[in-house]
């Protein structure tokens, strides 16, 4: 079985989207693939796609004029397509991919497709383990308000983009949320790279922390001398990564050497206080995200005053500290994307800052058995600011039988309870978790459902 890897495909340099008339997308309902399909459709390319299940994304795409089919069948693929773009979630055994080979049609993975797009623009890649989506949107909003008219590819739909996950602007500047999984971001031709942090993740692909760090070093080495890296100077591995840069480096953080220095809530540059950096989302991590976006936008000439006003009004992105409503018993329910131990701590820091006198319930769905096992020691101490942790299940994705035998929910709860000193409970599935929460919460409770799988289903059940 062959899985697509992110090694550079020579087709990325050869294909021009301007030459295409019809493209087929496998996995068109995905957050990333749908954005690329939207962009090509906006250029007049006929876009057809399929996904294993129907979804809200696909319904929206149909309204916009794209053809979206349910399931994966070879007969879905027209004989006259010029290109196929496939999601990382499928293999070369996919029937539509097989049909493309029969037709002799070139096939690109989604990251390779983004790579083609990046060659048409002055590309600003926002990357890092945590904070990519928020930093990407803050950067786009700052540049929009600064009248630089950027385009943007984002990993989530947002109101500011008309509830879409991309923005088509009129300038040559393209902001891309650049994912590190399988070295995907190495397909991009990058002029400006933002590194929010480097924190070992995607353990099914990156078997060691050193290999994870190496991927970021490879990205930085590929940025030309006239390019720019904007990096978090407070992050250990980021400091190591930027040593490989041949271009100019601009830093942000609390360190006194930072070019954009956070001193309390103030942002300083070259010993001068620029102003108070207020962000419409709670948490110190969001001030870091805003500082990174601030640095990018200043490089493109956006005035500081515009950025301070824009960031203060920022209300957040999809599934980031997202308030959904109250339960019948008065408990507040928030939905969040946090699943890595570092992101869990950041969300709980923000939760405790916002609700200092409330009981904090974190209902977390760890993502992948592999990641859960490899990072178990880090998860152990990540929940110290929660009062209760409830785990309905572990989300299975690309896990082997060995992965699934290494760890289970009860083991996770035992480790968390011992390491974080809070009550950790096996929720035994979604319905039982909802029933349990209705019993143990009240108007003095705040619930955060967190994870990157389907945990948002629990959140919706709580507020129904």
Image (cartoon, helix red, strand yellow):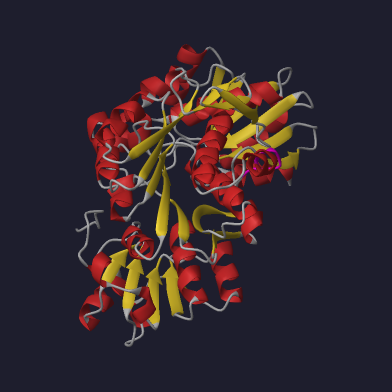
Q: Is residue 70 visible?
A: no
Q: Is residue 297 visible?
A: yes
**In the rendered image, which quarter is residue 18 located in?**
bottom left
- Between 332 and 344, the one lying in front of the other is 344
Residue sitting at x 58%, y 45%:
138
**In the rendered image, which quarter is residue 330 located in?**
top right
Left or right of 211: which side holds 330?
right
Q: Position of residue 248 (x, y in %)?
A: 35, 38
Which residue is situated farthest in the bottom direction here? 80
The image shows residue 138, relative to residue 1, as above or below, that is: above
The image shows residue 357, relative to residue 252, as above or below, that is: above
Q: Point out the image quarter for the N terminus.
A: bottom left
- Between 289 and 445, the one lying in front of the other is 289
Residue sitting at x 63%, y 23%:
265
Residue sitting at x 22%, y 76%:
101
- Between 259 and 183, the one lying in front of the other is 259
Q: Which residues are magenta?
A: 311-316
From the image, give the main secondary structure of the stretch colored magenta.
Answer: loop
The image shows residue 407, relative to residue 138, as above or below, that is: above
Residue sitting at x 59%, y 75%:
64
Q: Position of residue 266 (x, y in %)?
A: 62, 24
């Amino acid at each position: 079985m062959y899985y697509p890897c992110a090694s550079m495909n020579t087709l990325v340099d050869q294909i021009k989207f301007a030459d295409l008339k019809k493209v087929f997308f496998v996995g068109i309902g995905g957050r990333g693939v749908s954005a690329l399909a939207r962009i090509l459709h906006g250029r007049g390319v006929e876009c057809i796609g399929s996904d294993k299940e129907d979804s809200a994304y696909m319904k929206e795409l149909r309204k916009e004029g794209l053809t979206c089919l349910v399931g994966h069948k070879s007969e879905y693929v027209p004989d006259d397509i010029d290109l196929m773009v496939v999601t990382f979630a499928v293999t070369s055994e996919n029937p539509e991919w097989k049909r493309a080979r029969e037709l002799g049609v070139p096939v690109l993975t989604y990251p390779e497709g983004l790579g083609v797009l990046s060659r048409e623009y002055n590309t600003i890649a926002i990357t890092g383990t945590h904070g990519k989506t928020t930093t990407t949107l803050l950067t786009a909003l700052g540049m929009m308000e600064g009248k630089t008219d950027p385009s943007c590819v984002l990993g989530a739909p947002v109101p500011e983009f008309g509830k879409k996950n991309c923005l088509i602007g009129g300038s040559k500047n393209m902001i891309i949320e650049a994912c590190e999984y399988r070295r995907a971001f190495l397909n991009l031709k990058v002029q400006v790279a933002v590194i929010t942090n480097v924190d070992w993740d995607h353990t099914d692909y990156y078997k060691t922390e050193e290999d994870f760090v190496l991927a970021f070093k490879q990205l930085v080495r590929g940025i030309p001398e006239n390019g720019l890296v904007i990096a978090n100077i407070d992050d250990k591995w980021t400091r190591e990564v930027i040593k490989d840069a041949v271009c100019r480096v601009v830093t942000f953080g609390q360190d006194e050497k930072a070019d954009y220095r956070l001193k309390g809530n103030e942002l300083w540059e070259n010993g001068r206080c620029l102003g108070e950096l207020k962000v419409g989302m709670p948490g110190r991590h969001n001030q870091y995200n805003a500082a990174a976006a601030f640095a990018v936008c200043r490089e493109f000439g956006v005035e500081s005053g515009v950025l301070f006003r824009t960031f203060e009004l920022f209300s957040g992105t999809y599934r980031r500290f997202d308030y959904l409503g109250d339960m019948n018993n008065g408990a507040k329910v928030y939905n969040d994307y946090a699943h890595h131990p570092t992101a869990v701590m950041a969300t709980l820091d923000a939760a405790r800052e916002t609700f200092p006198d409330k009981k904090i319930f974190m209902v977390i769905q760890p993502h992948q058995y592999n990641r859960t096992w490899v990072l178990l020691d880090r998860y152990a101490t990540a929940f110290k600011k929660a009062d209760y942790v409830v785990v309905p299940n572990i989300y299975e994705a690309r896990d082997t039988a060995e992965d699934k035998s290494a760890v289970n929910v009860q083991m996770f709860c035992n480790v968390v309870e011992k390491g974080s000193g809070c009550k950790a409970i096996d929720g035994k599935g979604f319905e039982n978790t909802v029933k349990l929460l209705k019993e143990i919460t009240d108007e003095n409770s705040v619930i955060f459902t967190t994870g990157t799988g389907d945990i948002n289903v629990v959140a919706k059940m709580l507020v129904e």
